[in-house]
Amino acid sequence: MKHQPGITTPLQAVGHLVAFDLVAGAGRREAAALLRRWSDTARRLMAGEAAAQGDTDVARDAGPSSLTVTFGFGHSFFSRTGLERQRPDALDPLPDFSSDRLDKKRSDGDLWVQIGANDSLVAFHALRAIQKDAGSAARVRWQMSGFNRSPGATDRPMTTRNLMGQIDGTRNPKPSESDFEERIFVPASGDPAWMANGSYAVVRRIRMLLDDWEDLSLKEQEDVIGRKKSDGAPLTGGGETTEPDLEKTGADGKLIVPINAHARITRPDQNGGAAMLRRSFSFHDGFGSDGVPDAGLLFVCWQADPLRGFVPVQRKLDRGDALSAFIRHEASGLFAVPGGAAEGEYVGQRLLEG
């Protein structure tokens, strides 16, 4: 398998993101044994089989339900395992941004696992199996759960919507594009060698200030985004995939797509060609005592190098994106996700046994 599943896989209805820290005294040997267990369990569950040991039967007869399990390494993993020299430069900590309100306890981690499925029981079954497999080697640092529209929920397939009601992911890179692999995956000749065919995942828990957002008129919301809420088409006309005319003005002489519209600022041609593959889940973790929803986006994006993907785009957003007034980044992580494992191998084997 060239790449791990869960990167270019179509979005599933249910997602769990979970980070682990190695326990005190656990090092490279324990990490290798853990990744071998995890890889074996993931392989079995993705095939619709029971876990090798102690299966809970939660997903009995459910089938794989498009299950994917993806593994990554955080910055701290390398010092914990004595592998500092193998830590990629691309794992350097992300810069601070003005919209950050980060909870350190829900950020980062030695190890990261992304689970996706189209059945809630299948997804939970995998989450529980991975957590049990951690045994005495690692403990959960944080865990977040999210959702998307279920496949087949609409007879008009389209890009998913987020909790602001906006179509989210219109300009995602597509595997059919000639430079897709170059933008999203580390080349086979990349450095370090163990990251060949891998990718880097940026994870952000983005809380949406929905009460403030919903107070806006439809026109105000569309001006913030730069697209029609109904179908994601640019304000300058056409359909969802139509290229916006960023120079077009209205009868009043003003730009139709405002200068600080989210769709304008995030365009690759406005960011030196920076691009990333967004593959996110919405979340809702209840209501506060004041009735305000704790809801938003579990933002996950993939790129060959965060310094040529997430970072330049977020820096541009940080300097004047109209959407920034309605969101808060509350948790963050950056993880190196190695390439896929061949039959009989485990994810990260080239790193841990190299």
Image (spheres, helix red, strand yellow):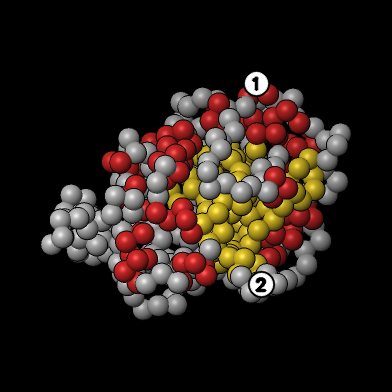
User: What is the x, y in percent for residue 349?
Assistant: 65, 34
- Please identify the quarter of the rendering in which residue 228 is found: bottom left
In the shown orientation, is residue 265 left or right of residue 124?
A: left
Which residue is found at the position 37% from the left and 66% from the top? 221
Which residue is found at the position 19% from the left and 63% from the top? 237
Residue closer to the observer: 167 or 83: 167
Residue 62, numbered circle:
none
Between tags 1 and 2, which lies in front? 2
Q: Is residue 39 visible?
A: no
In the shown orientation, is residue 149 left or right of residue 218?
A: right
Task: Provide the residue designation for mark 2.
Answer: 290
In the shown orientation, is residue 111 left or right of residue 194?
A: right
Mark 2 is on which residue type? Answer: Asp
Q: Is residue 250 visible?
A: yes
| Circle 2 SS class | loop
Asked if 168 appears above or below 346 in the picture, the reply is below
Q: Which residue occupies the extreme front position in the image? A: 252
Which residue is found at the position 65% from the left and 34% from the top? 75
| Circle 1 SS class | helix
Asked if 209 appears above or below 100 in the picture, the reply is below
Mark 1 is on which residue type? Answer: Arg
Task: Provide the residue designation for mark 1.
Answer: 85
User: What is the x, y in percent for residue 65?
Assistant: 56, 67
